[in-house]
Image (tube, rainbow, N blue to C red):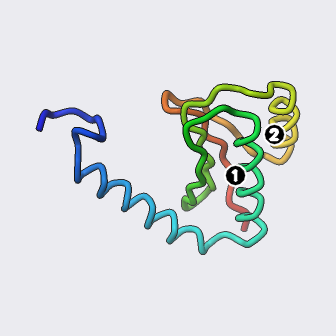
Amino acid sequence: MDDTTNNKSAGQFAWAARMNAISTSNMHKQNYSDAQKLRAEQIRLALELVYYHKKVHNTFRKTKIAIKVENPRVADRKTLAQLEADWKAEGITSKNTPQGIIYSIKKQK
């Protein structure tokens, strides 16, 4: 096995890291209200409509819900611009990464 960070080369370590991420997300999910979980799901579904993508998924963290769009390509620029303007007014932020775009919803107390 060569020493790379590629998930296929990492084998069981990549699988274990993914299982840890899933269990951590599930653990943090219980700390969010039903309204917050519903809002994250609504945003995820909207992103699936405006992007061509490999995958869109929610990850629940200690302080925020992250919605990641992997390998995004914009399908509907007009609708995306309207959604992002509305989300910005709500305090939802976005960040471009090499793997995709991450939209973040801050945890409400």
Residue 4 placement, left or right of 69: left
Give the labeled residue for mark 1.
Answer: 105
Residue 63 placement, left or right of 79: left
Instruction: Find residue 60 and report its image quarter.
Output: bottom right
SS class, disc 2 = helix
Instruction: Find residue 96 and report its image quarter.
Output: top right
Give the x, y percent position of residue 31: 61, 72
Q: Compared to 28, does 102 lie above or below?
A: above
Name the N-terminal-most of marks 2 and 1: 2
Q: Residue at x 74, y 72 (%)?
A: 34
- For label 1, the crowd category at 10 Å Cα-Cα, with few meaning under 14, some 14 to 19 and many 20 or more, is many
Give the labeled residue for mark 2.
Answer: 88
- For label 2, the crowd category at 10 Å Cα-Cα, with few meaning under 14, some 14 to 19 and many 20 or more, is few
Quarter of the picture containing the C terminus is bottom right
Q: Residue at x 60, y 58 (%)?
A: 63
Going by the numbered disc 2, the residue's amino acid type is Lys
